[in-house]
């Protein structure tokens, strides 16, 4: 089962309808409103569809009201929360370590492993960088965001 199908199942279990929709603009990839998520029919890959669906699920769980006007600070904050929710759902620090353990050493390989687009993975890494700073630690791993992206497994000392 693809991650897009898994996310569709999660949405269904939570009472959210997911449908393909022909938007008038190529700029609109997805939209959430009243327990319904519309995904653009123009999206050609399952990986991109799953990235869009993850963010729209983020809107379901974190957004209140109409936030289309992004000149409002409170709307931008809600958009950020929805995106972060999507990044964590689709990528997550643990997903990065799993990709590393699977032998992924480039962003392309990681994106492929995580069934995400490279652009979405880069956006997630930028977001994690802004949250964690130079590096983040999880379990026995250090994920470096500076000076360049890398993952390192640490060795735990036994007494």
Image (cartoon, rainbow, N blue to C red):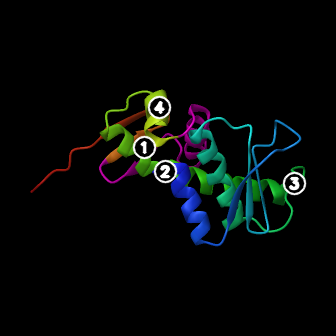
Which residue is denoted by mark 2 in the rendering?
92
Separation of marks 4 and 2 at Cα, in angstroms: 15 Å
Is label 3 in contact with label 2 (beta carbons under 8 Å)?
A: no
Q: Residue furthest left?
A: 159
Numbered circle sitting on residue 149: 4
Identify which residue is drawn at 29% across, 41% down. Answer: 153
Residue 78 location (% of width, % of height): 75, 59
Of residues 105 and 42, the one nearer the viewer is 42
Neighbor class of circle 4 (other Cα within 10 Å; few <14, some 14-19, many 20+) is some
Is label 2 in contact with label 1 (beta carbons under 8 Å)?
A: yes
Q: Is residue 81 visible?
A: no
Residue 102 position (above or below residue 90): above
Q: Is residue 113 visible?
A: yes
Which element is circle 1 on?
helix
Neighbor class of circle 3 (other Cα within 10 Å; few <14, some 14-19, many 20+) is few
| Among numbered discs 4 and 3, the one appearing first in the sequence | 3
Of residues 82 and 14, the one nearer the viewer is 14
Find residue 127 and report its image quarter: top right
Numbered circle sitting on residue 96: 1
Residue 26 location (% of width, % of height): 82, 35
Which element is circle 3 on?
loop
Q: How many marks?
A: 4
């Amino acid at each position: 089962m693809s991650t897009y199908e898994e996310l569709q199942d999660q949405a269904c279990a939570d009472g959210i309808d997911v449908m393909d929709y022909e938007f008038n603009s190529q700029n609109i990839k997805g939209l959430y409103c009243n327990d319904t998520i519309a995904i653009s029919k123009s999206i050609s890959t399952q990986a991109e569809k799953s990235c869009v669906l993850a963010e729209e699920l983020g809107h379901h769980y974190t957004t209140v009201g109409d936030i289309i006007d992004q000149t409002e600070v409170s709307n931008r904050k809600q958009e950020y929360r929805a995106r972060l929710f999507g990044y964590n759902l689709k990528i997550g620090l643990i997903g990065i370590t799993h990709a590393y353990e699977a032998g992924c050493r480039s962003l392309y390989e990681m994106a492929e492993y995580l069934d995400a687009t490279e652009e979405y993975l880069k956006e997630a890494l930028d977001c994690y960088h802004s949250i964690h700073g130079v590096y983040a630690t999880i379990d026995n791993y250090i994920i470096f965001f500076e000076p360049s992206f890398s993952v390192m497994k640490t060795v735990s000392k036994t007494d």
